[in-house]
Image (tube, helix red, strand yellow):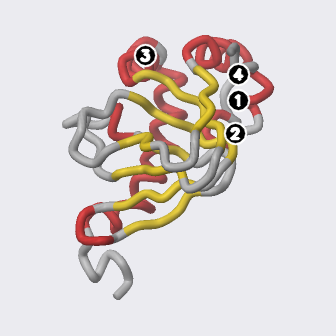
């Protein structure tokens, strides 16, 4: 199914992009129906896809039992698809039925390499998300506020 630029416009990750950039991204995105119990990402496996949550609830779990849930439209799974070593750092499982936008890691990396305007805007936002989630990845007590 074709993803509209209107759908992308409603997502914080893409809100600062112009219509041309949104059209480019929408041509690379796929709408996926997610079933309860479906695994979107498996920790340690090659990161093949990047997901933007549209609906549903998802458990993101890390080594050592650290985890959190995602349930808001626009939250992302699979940033490891654009960050070396291109392996998922967490396992993401759907707790309910939902929908997500998906882009292959190859398409996403190509997009970032070919368009510096898009790359700069998206990477600033993704970097902020990575910073917020890093305590769960590293598991250090000081970074978790413990």
Question: Tag 2 or tag 4, which sits nearer the N-term?
Answer: 2
Along the line of sight, which residue is nearer the eye, 27 or 1? 1
**Crowd around label 4: few <14 · some 14–19 · many ≥20 (10 Å):** few
| Mark 2 in CB contact with mark 3 (< 8 angstroms) | no
Q: In the rendered image, which residue does mark 3 sit on?
A: 107
- Looking at the rendered structure, the secondary structure element under dot 4 is loop
Along the line of sight, which residue is nearer the eye, 138 or 90? 90
Question: Tag 3 or tag 1, which sits nearer the N-term?
Answer: 1
- Looking at the rendered structure, the secondary structure element under dot 2 is loop
Q: In the rendered image, which residue does mark 4 sit on?
A: 18
Q: Kindly report the distance in space between the C-alpha atoms of the residues bearing marks 2 and 3.
A: 19 Å
Residue 101 placement: quadrant: top right
**Crowd around label 2: few <14 · some 14–19 · many ≥20 (10 Å):** some
Q: Nearer the viewer, mark 1 or mark 4?
A: 1
Q: Kindly report the distance in space between the C-alpha atoms of the residues bearing marks 2 and 1.
A: 5 Å
Residue 142 placement: quadrant: bottom left
Question: Tag 3 or tag 2, which sits nearer the N-term?
Answer: 2
Q: In the rendered image, which residue does mark 1 sit on?
A: 8
Q: State the mark number for residue 88.
A: none
Query: Which residue is drawn at the image coordinates 65% and 43% (left, top)?
Result: 98
| Mark 4 in CB contact with mark 2 (< 8 angstroms) | no
């Amino acid at each position: 199914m074709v993803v509209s630029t209107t759908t992308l416009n409603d997502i914080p990750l893409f809100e600062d992009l112009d219509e041309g950039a949104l059209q480019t991204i929408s041509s690379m995105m796929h709408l996926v129906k997610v079933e309860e119990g479906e695994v979107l990402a498996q920790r340690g496996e090659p990161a093949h896809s990047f997901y933007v949550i549209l609906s549903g609830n998802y458990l993101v779990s890390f080594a050592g039992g650290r985890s959190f849930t995602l349930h808001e439209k626009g939250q992302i799974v699979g940033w490891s698809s654009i960050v070396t070593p291109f392996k998922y750092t967490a396992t993401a499982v759907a707790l309910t039925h939902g929908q997500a936008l998906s882009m292959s890691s190859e398409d996403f990396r190509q997009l970032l390499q070919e368009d510096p305007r898009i790359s700069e805007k998206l990477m600033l936002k993704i970097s902020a998300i990575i910073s917020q989630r890093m305590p769960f990845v590293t598991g250090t007590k000081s970074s978790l506020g413990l």
